[in-house]
Amino acid sequence: MNRRTFTQRTLLAAISVGVANALGGCGSGDSVDNLPVTIPSDWTGVLNTVVNTIKQKHILPWRNTSESEFDAKVVALRARIATLDDGAALAETMALIASLGDGHTSISGWKYARFLPVAFEPFSDGIFVTAAASSSSALIGHELISIAGVPAAQLLQRTAKLWPTENDSGVQLWGSVFLSIDIALRYAGVAVGTGGVEIELRDPNSATTAFKKITLSPTLESLPTATGTAPLPRFRQDPSLNYWIEYLAGTDVIYFRYRRCVDGNAVRSLLENFEQSTRGRVPRAIVLDVRGNEGGDSSVLSGFIAGLRSSGWDKRPGTLFLLSDRKTFSAGMDACLDMLELGAIHLGDVPSQRPNFLGNLVTYDTPRDGVKLVYPTRVATRVAGYPSQLVPTERLIPSAGDHFAGRDPVIARALLRIGTN
């Protein structure tokens, strides 16, 4: 990705913006239902094509907001988008699409953004640095107190507005991710200049509780990945593996780690090989772990679910367990609902989307280089009504101490309920 470049505007362009504003932001005779695309690669043209695409092709755009509310935001943004630099124009357009409140409808263009050398994650006891570029690896494990003097929790609520969130889990998840992205920080009111931005941190290993302030500059082209020697909980290990299955050590509990919904044939082979290698061993319980599963093909797990039902596991109370977290999404949510229909005990955190959701995504390349719109073409109705979240049988949110010590309180709780401890 190249550095964000700022589009130069002429005096004539500024005058045209003023005229558009006086006419309600759409120009004489224009309607928000069919905005003109006169300069496709300009941010005004991008906005127009995105709005037109949403209105003409999105299967259910007004599920969480009214069309009139959306139109008002379009008018307001269109009146000033030509005066914004690339990063601000992208952020404002992202916030517009995010206001639809549908986790499967989003716009992005990361070539116009830069990232801090640290990544944050929320836990039960605060927001912490969980990954960093090698130059900042000493900061892993520090708690985030504030950025540019704004308390972390407050800033997280602001940055989350750039991504479509369906419940508070989504706000926590995406708000923390966007704390590392310059265009999100700027949108949230934080001045991110060439000299960087001041970050206030607390070192939990320090003998004192004093905070320290450092200046970090957003120069990376993507979020940093974890570095350092701290152990990770088992379910976070082997990130290159989409799934694995095993008996948990010292137990007769089958653990199926299902990180991504891809490659049904590979999953089928995995399960068949596992069954052959453990033939004659009678499992006491089965745990399906869909933490971090952001979706894919819902049919990948259909054979596993059918096998559980045909083997009568749905008639054995207290033997099926489901583990989820904030990152569980889309086809990952389908896996949750499949297990719950079998009577599984649900442990972990609330997934970041509603149980009834939109899917079958289409990616649309806007006229602006690198800016993509994603929208759904299918409605998935799995439960009665339209609840905002899927609440686990027992909600468990790990602490930062658990994470950095490699502990997994969710699987520990499952084993306790099974009775292996």
Image: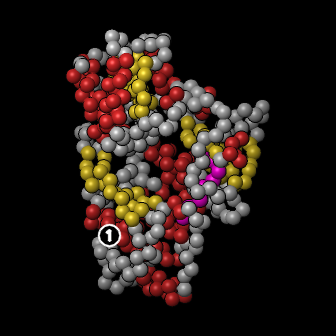
Residue 260 pos. (x, y %): 40, 39
Quadrant assignment, res 381: top left
Look at the image and say whether residue 118 sits in the magenta stretch: yes
Which residue position holds label 1?
52
Look at the image and say whether residue 228 sits in the magenta stretch: no
Specify few, some or many for label 1: CA neighbours under 10 Å numbering under 14, 14-19, or 20 or more.
Answer: some
Of 370 and 342, nearer the camera is 370
Q: Amino acid at mark 1?
A: Asn
Residue 374 pos. (x, y %): 37, 58
Image position of 239 (left or right of 116)? left
Identify which residue is drawn at 53% across, 54% down. 159
Identify which residue is drawn at 42% across, 62% down. 372
Image position of 61 (left or right of 171)? left
Identify which residue is drawn at 65% across, 47% down. 133
Q: Which quadrant of the rendered structure holds the N terminus?
A: bottom right
Which region is colored magenta? Answer: 112-120
Give the answer, above or below, for where 64 lies relative to 367: above
Give the answer, above or below, for where 291 lies relative to 255: below
Q: Secondary structure at mark 1?
A: helix
Residue 179 pos. (x, y %): 58, 51
| Type of colouring | secondary structure
Of 10 and 63, nearer the camera is 10
